Image (spheres, rainbow, N blue to C red):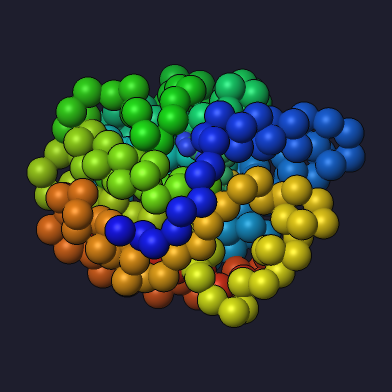
């Protein structure tokens, strides 16, 4: 389907993020860049992208690969959800850090974080109205991507929305490969085109996927791709 034979160990990716977020100056930098305060850096146009999903207070929202909860914190500051927003991430350390961030933001009880892998989401069928995922699916190999998209379709109610954004496969994405070789960040990843992602979404049972205009990101200066898929 997606055309890459690369194998990626999901738990190892989670461990690498855990280490990068935990230690020394690097940890401080990572915790800032991936926090609510750092959204302007790594997720500059997130408000514009999220607007495409038309999220309302009644929506039951899941953030897949939520990291330390940055997007859920920003969403919950602006929307008084009637159900707690939910985040899931494969890294137990990031979930732990995220719970502290949520407490600090005064959002205890309004956001719930769980440890879990994209390929086996710890939620019942049709539990959510909206799933968002930012900068996560590059860490899924082809097999895991199919399984993850099927899992997202399973946990969404019929007509539910799935909003994803990620680095795009493009010659302009070279800085990511240079950074990975020089520093180990990001951990193992594979980039895909819009067509590849759309085919994977349709194969997982989504009825359609439209492109969302992203606007510019500050860091890293690599083009992104955003899609809104309907279950
Ligand atoms: C680049 S960070 C993005 C964090 C956040 N979504 C954001 O945009 O700021 C990638 C996140 O995806 C998580 N992740 C990677 N592979 C995953 C998987 N297979 N299942 C769940 N989470 C995963 C990592 O642990 C990490 O928190």
- Residue at 51%, 51% (x, y): give it: 6
Residue positioned 67% across, 50% down in the render: 186
Whether residue 221 is situated above or below residue 159 in the rendered picture: below
Up the image or down, 162 lies above or below 110; here it is below
Badge count: 0
Q: Quadrant of residue 213?
A: bottom left
Ligand 1 in which quarter:
top right
In the image, farthest residue toward the right: 25
Relative to 231, say whether 14 is above or below: above
Residue 14 appears left or right of 210:
right
- Residue 103 visible here: no
Residue found 75% across the figure and 37% down from its top? 20
- The image quadrant where one finds the N terminus is bottom left
**Residue 7 at what x, y percent from top left?**
51, 44
- In the picture as drawn, the residue positioned furthest to the bottom comes out as 171
On the image, the x and y values in percent for residue 218 come to 67, 68
Across and down, in percent, residue 68 comes to 59, 34
Say which residue appears at 44% left-offset and 30% top-offset: 117
Residue 93 quadrant: top right
Judging depth in this view, the residue of 70 and 181 nearest the camera is 181
């Amino acid at each position: 389907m997606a055309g890459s034979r690369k194998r990626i160990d999901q738990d190892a990716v989670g461990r690498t993020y855990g280490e990068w977020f935990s230690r020394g100056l690097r940890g401080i930098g990572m915790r800032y860049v991936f926090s609510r305060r750092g959204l302007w850096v790594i997720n500059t146009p997130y408000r514009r992208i999220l607007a495409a999903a038309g999220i309302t207070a009644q929506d039951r929202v899941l953030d897949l690969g939520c990291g330390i909860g940055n997007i859920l914190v920003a969403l919950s500051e602006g929307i008084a959800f009637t159900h707690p927003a939910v985040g899931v991430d494969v890294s137990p350390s990031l979930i732990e850090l995220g719970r502290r961030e949520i407490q600090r933001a005064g959002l205890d009880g309004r956001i719930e974080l769980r440890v879990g892998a994209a390929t086996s989401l710890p939620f019942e069928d049709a539990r959510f109205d909206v799933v968002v995922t930012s900068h996560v699916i590059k860490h899924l190999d082809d097999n895991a991507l199919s399984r993850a998209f099927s899992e997202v379709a399973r946990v969404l109610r019929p007509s539910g929305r799935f909003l994803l954004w990620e680095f795009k496969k493009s010659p302009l994405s070279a800085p990511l490969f240079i950074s990975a070789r020089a520093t180990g960040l990001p951990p193992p990843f594979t980039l895909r085109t819009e067509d590849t992602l759309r085919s994977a979404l349709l194969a997982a049972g989504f009825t359609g996927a439209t492109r969302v205009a992203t606007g510019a990101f500050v860091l890293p200066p690599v083009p992104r791709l955003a899609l809104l898929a309907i279950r």
